Amino acid sequence: MSEIVDYSPVPVLLVSPSNRIQRASIALLEAWGHSRDQLLDRDLFVALYEGSPTERFDRIPLVYVIETAVASRAVRFCHAAYVVDGVSWTARVIPIHQGDELLWLIFEWQKAEININGTDGEILQSWLPIDDAFHILVQAVEDYAIFLLDTRGNVVTWNPGAQSIKGYKGEEVLGKHFSIFYGSDDIQSHKPEKALEICLREGRVEEEGWRYRKDGTLFWANVVITPVYKNNVLIGFAKVTHNLTERKEAERQLIAAYDETAKLKSDFLANISHEIRNPMHGMLSACALLLDSGLTEKQLEMANLIGESGRVLYQIINSILDYSKLEAHNLSINNDKIDFASVITSVVRSCQATLRLGVSLRLLLAPDLPKWANGDALRCRQITENLVGNAAKFTESGVIQVSVSLLAQDAATYTILSEVADTGPGVSKEDSKRLFRPFTQLDTTHQKRHQGTGLGLSIAKALAELMGGDIGYKPNPEPQGSIFWFTVKLEKFDTIQQIRPAIEQPQATHGDDPGTHLAQLMQIAPTARILAAEDNIINQKVLVGILNVLKFQYITIVSDGAQAVSVLSAAPDAFDLILMDISMPVMNGYEATVQLRNAGVRVPIIAMTAYALKGDMEHCLEQGVDDHVAKPVDRELLAEKLLKWLKSQSVGHGAVVQLLLDQGADKEAKNAYRRMPLYVAGAEGHQAVAQLLLDQGANKEAEDEFGSTLLDSAARGVVRLLLHYGADKEAKNGYGRTSLHVAAGAGHGTVARLLVDEGADKEVW
């Protein structure tokens, strides 16, 4: 084989399967002017292309031809595969196999001024003759840049369209590499050569992107590159470029218009939500107060009708807002600790009152349901309420059964299956296909028996999918009716990472008994001082009524944010909690909150807003608000929030108060102490304690220390007197928790340190 190659009259290279040159014929060495040392045992592509300014592009056609020759076990040609001394050489690639093993690659070389006949391989003619008609056609096109590249990517033809679009004259670009049309980022990422590689592999490549004109300006181009073959030999590439800058600008304007429309829609929904929710808050809250006012039976019936109609309207508004948020992909899912079984139980309990006579509602909970998981309790409840509510609406007799089971679990999640089976009329096969479409109701417009927007099931479907689950329908085989089911994925609860410290206040969870919260709040409410900022006169009266029902006595009302700032600037320690409406004249709730926080006021602020779109809560928190309730205000939810923030402050001082009571302090004195701003280590409150302790026989030394205006002395007196009267470790730690909201931090910070010195658990701080 070696001698055959060496003495072949044709320029030949013998190459190993790993692309190492093993032999070179004398004819090749003479034709190329190389020595054997320049070629033997070198990588084929390094030997041929090293040092070429277009090295990355030069090798692309030959790599492709070698791959296709080996794969097809047939001879393949690579036109102008190598250039030496200005002469292009075409390679005839011959793979040599033994069975499935590739033994050798033989490369026979011919000068490229001549081409290959596809039938017998004879040398025939010029490499690229262009038909006159085709040439005339290409030259007549001015809207498209149409030109040809050789196998290495150099421009070999140029039409008027190319000159018009790219700005180059033919003499300026012919022979130049086509990468001059790309930006530096594209060249660094090897985009031009990748385009040719894809073109050879897939037969064409099409892309859109920014391209450069001669003057450096950019235009948005659609580019199509295809390989050009003659008699199965690759002789170059055809490239067609279309200037789409105007279309790109039109698209940009459409997107901008769409974004503006979406913003206008969002603003409209926010405003209409606010305008509807504000009077609805007044109506529903006033109705709730009216129901508690000792009405006659007839009056009670009318008030209930008003309340029920208002709640239906409220549900319709919420459905429309939810659908709008889902349609705009603006509805997010929370991931909080929930007890899924308690959520479902609460829904079933609340739906009992909606059942017709003769209908029973059952709940079956699988014993292997997880107690705790992470998920969105509100959205799980919303789906369940919709399905159970529909079952109650359509079932006139029989049984509704809610079943909840653990469908699957993996290392990170539980998949929970909930089914609602009823004995109602069922759903026809045809109607079942459109159950989950928006605005779909099975009643006709003129024969409507049931209320609703037709959005409930479509919203439930979207929510289930957002929570990693699904929803569906199937007929109830026994004896008739429907079974609606849904699944959700809940993250497993990490008890190690999420256990709360012993000092943290218990948070209300969905499913807790609201009566317990109410009782706890009513113990705190009589001495708590509330500042409410609300501009609407009706809402002011309603809010005062709700707070009075909850046993609050010290309530101050202001009509805008500026008044709230003024009141708190004059007496920053005069209130225990602020209820802040957001949309108010003169100064809105956001601006007022920012000013208060910047002034150092750390009183808890609960925002009350009729805006109910995505981002409202997040925006409230960003401005310094501690919590948020939406209008119409749910009385139980408001009570829960008030308890959360008032209790978090009162627990430490409550320990002091309880000790005072244990020592016989009367109720009036106790209230005097509790009216003290709970987070301020000032003289007024501590003097009240000092006087009470003195009345109970505290020694003079302790009184002097406590009554001192120096904060350190006052704090030391509190600690010692607590210890003197037998305060246990939990009481000490409980007192220390008040330091979490400190406005004048030195006093309580000192209390904290002294408690630690006296043996309180250091982790509390």
Image (cartoon, helix red, strand yellow):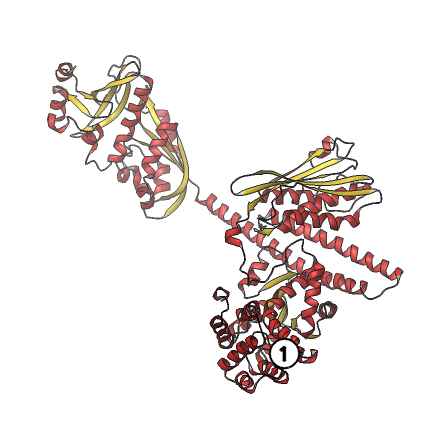
The residue located at (75%, 34%) in the rendering is 427
- Which percent across, then down, holds residue 283? 76, 62
339 versus 762 height, above or below: above
Kind of residue sitting beneath label 1: Tyr
What is the total number of numbered labels drawn onto the structure image?
A: 1
627 versus 255 height, above or below: below
Q: Quadrant of residue 550?
A: bottom right
- Which percent across, then down, holds residue 357? 85, 45
The residue located at (21%, 35%) in the rendering is 52
- Whether residue 143 can be seen here: no
Q: Residues within 10 Å of mark 1 (few under 14, many from 20)?
A: many
Q: Quadrant of the N terminus?
A: top left
- Which percent across, then down, holds residue 267? 61, 57
164 versus 540 height, above or below: above
The residue tagged 1 is: 673
Q: Quadrant of residue 430?
A: top right
Q: Most extreme residue toward the top, as rendered?
A: 120
- Which percent across, then down, holds residue 310? 76, 57
| The one of 203 and 740 positioned closer to us in this rendering | 740
| The one of 473 and 135 positioned closer to us in this rendering | 473
Report whether 58 appears left or right of 347.
left
- Whether residue 622 can be seen here: yes
| The one of 706 and 193 positioned closer to us in this rendering | 706
Report whether 324 appears left or right of 124.
right
Secondary structure of residue under mark 1: helix
